[in-house]
Amino acid sequence: MFLLGASLGSFYNVLIYRIPRGISIVSPPSHCPQCGQRIRWYDNIPIVSYLILKGRCRHCGAKISIRYPLVEAFTGFLAVLCRVRFEEPLLSLVFFVFFSMLLVASLIDWDTFILPDIFTLGGLAFGLVVSVLRQDFSLKESLLGAFVGGVLFLLIYLYYTKLRKIEGLGFGDVKLMAFIGSVAGLWGVVYAVFLGSLLGLLYALPIILKNKSLQFALPYGPFLSLGVFLGIVLDLKRFFF
């Protein structure tokens, strides 16, 4: 499971790099962004190749971001975690896909402040469709979660853009919350909002204290995603029942 996840993580790195740049995810083949040399299969083995090459391109010696092996390792860990955490195979697959989409979308958001529709609206469609197949979740719960998550953030978005005339959060976050609600239901929305806000505040606080200003931009998507991830994996709702 780890090896399968790590291999998928290598593909996720392609998505993270190419989708925001409008580059095809199948052509051209993997290549060094510095020298343009094609990366051979033996230099593209997840995690291992990075360690062997000591984080540098074989041809030009350009430094390779540590993010690449970290994404591969985390995706491998994610595959194992989902299989262990969720006993039912379909549920394991659903949440692996869910967390994977959040991971890729979050890293794109971190780099570009953009949440691509292919992950938000595509994820919303995924959540609604698989709810029909799940034993633990119904289409009604999926629709309710998507509605509450989407409408809640739509109201916040409108408050900032229409009343305060500033962009407090992006419309991509509205679609992301609808996606989260469609897969994780109302509890997923709660986890994303409260844990995500707390994590975002903890990250932002040192920046605020250092700059003595609230005038800075921070992508919200990664924190919302991390919040719902922690809430689901730790099953935090059990503390309330």
Image: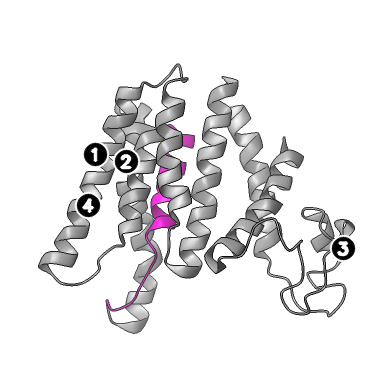
Please, which colouring scheme is shown? one colour
The type of residue carrying mark 3 is Ile
Q: Residues within 10 Å of mark 2 (few under 14, many from 20)?
A: many
The residue under label 1 is 148
The residue under label 3 is 52
Residue at horizontal 28%, vertical 81%? 213
Please provide percent x and percent y for residue 48. 83, 55
Please provide percent x and percent y for residue 236. 39, 34
The residue under label 4 is 154
The residue under label 2 is 189
Closest to the observer, 197 or 129: 129
Q: Which residues are magenta?
A: 214-236
Give the mark nearer the N terminus: 4 vs 2: 4
> Can you say which quadrant of the picture contains the C terminus?
top left
Q: Is 186 placed above or below 170 here?
A: above
The type of residue carrying mark 1 is Val
Could you tell me if the residues under marks 1 and 2 are in contact, i.e. CB atoms within 8 Å? yes
Q: Residues within 10 Å of mark 4 (few under 14, many from 20)?
A: some
Q: Quadrant of residue 205?
A: bottom left
The type of residue carrying mark 4 is Leu
